[in-house]
Image (tube, coloured by chain):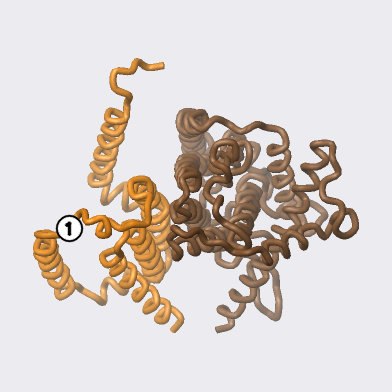
Amino acid sequence: MAAVIIIVIKGLILAVLLLTAFGVLTLTERKVLGRFQFRPGPNRVGPGGSFQFLADGLKLMLKEEIIPNGADRFVFLLAPTISLVAALFAFAVIPWGPPIHLFGQTIPMEIGGPNVGILFLFAITSLGVYGLILGGWSSQNKYSLLGGLRSSAQIISYELAMGLSVVGVLIAAGSADLNNIVSAQTNLWFIVPQIIGFLIYVVCMVAETNRAPFDLPEAENELVAGYHTEYTGMKFAMFFMAEYINMVTVSSLATTLFLGGWHGPWLPPEIWFIIKVAAFMFFFIWLRATLPRLRYDRLMAFGWKVLLPVALANALATAVWVSVVAR
Amino acid sequence: MVSTVVFWLAAAVAIVGAGGVLLAKHPVHSALSLVLNLAALGVLFLLLHAEFLAVVEILVYAGAVMVLFLFVVTLLMAGTKTPRDEGRFRLAYQYLLAGLFGLILFVLVAHALVGADWMSSLAATNAGGSFGSIAAFGTALFTKYLLPFELTAVVLLVAVIGVIFLGREHGATRK
């Protein structure tokens, strides 16, 4: 029974942390984007605009919730729920610190650590795409539908390259358990031997979260706002939260797989983890401020004809290395 | 104790999902019910300590196959009107056929269940250790079940070649 209570408490703490991170991230993104574009960014609410995210949240909560007349009401409400639940659920297996000892019990920092940890994470994130495709269909709006279809095609395509890009790490660590992968990097982070896998992963993680320059599903000059065109108020906010939490999750996975997880000198491990994830988040914003959007056919061709073969070759090369040379 | 509760919940959800596939009026709702059913089956696999199978069930079926199903269904039936509303696809002889095949399936499953050796299966799943792990699964796939595994790979390869053949632009030269 105690085990169940511990899991519930950890789940609550993690959900609160992730939602707080979402608030802080939206503010950071607006401020940093502002600096990139030689403007101050939000600076009216609170000191230096630092309460802007509270104002944004309040606005979204108080807005009128509109459901289009022809919409499939049940699916329309289900779609943002799936997105947010999948985003929150996926983080459950990420070890963001070494186990702590409290009240005579050893408590791991992740909520669950199955020995198929990384596959579990991919399985849950692959469910997130339902939110987009269903949101697009149930709105009964052609822009929404096209946005939803685009996003599902994009996410399925890049999921393959993403999955293959981490195979090298799994072979090198000899385990799919995220804790074992972290401890395998005590001496050398996998970014050094697996640099090709890392680069493919980074490209895929931007595509998977539908962020610029791969934000095709919401290309406003062709699709208005894509799958969430008809969404307002909190339902829109749920899609918004899911996007940012997904960014945190893929960044955390990149940290765990390639940057040694919570390993680092001097500072506490949890702080190291947050620093590494924050660096990825800055990278996301940097990309958005720098690169123009890709054309849709180029995006698909790049995923299938470049990333996928290179990721396969990398996995093969790692397998040969581990089984022939390193033995 | 906890696992018993989880089992009954997952079993109930699986049956509700399976029922939804048949009873839903719109194909999108049917597809969603199937996703629910697959997710519940994943939980049941987890209870049997088959972690890898559980994850693959969700990753491949719920996460990829059903997304493609929905992809096609949402594109072909973009409206919320059901086929029945539009007076198409009235079922005539399908009820009879479905009943016949359902009966055959029921007899087969019942036969398998009556002859099953429950205790040894239970012992296998409760053995713990490496049962259901990626390593055990991979070893079985590449030793005991190598032939079916390779045959499946050939079938998939044929499908891939077929898709490329059908999907190419007719009469267009390669750019």
Q: Does residue A11 appear to the left or right of A20 in the view shown?
A: left
Q: Which chain is orange?
A: B
Structural crowding at the residue carrying mark 1, measured as other residues with C-alpha within 10 Å and reported as few (<14), some (14–19) or many (≥20)? few
The residue under the point 73% across, 53% down is A26
Question: Is residue A221 shown above or below A131?
Answer: above
Give how far across and how far down residue A108 sits, in percent.
63, 67
The residue under the point 84% across, 57% down is A50
The residue under the point 38% across, 60% down is B32
Identified by mark 1, the residue type is Arg
Report how many numbered discs are placed on residues in the image. Answer: 1
Q: Which chain is brown?
A: A
Which residue is more in the foreground, B39 or B26?
Answer: B26
Question: Is residue B174 shown above or below A227?
Answer: above
Give how far across and how far down residue A115 sits, in percent.
50, 60
Q: Which residue is mark 1?
A: B90
Give how far across and how far down residue B88 sits, in percent.
21, 54
Question: Is residue B108 shown above or below A29?
Answer: below
Q: Does residue A140 appear to the left or right of A237 in the view shown?
A: left
- Dot 1 falls on a residue whose secondary structure is loop
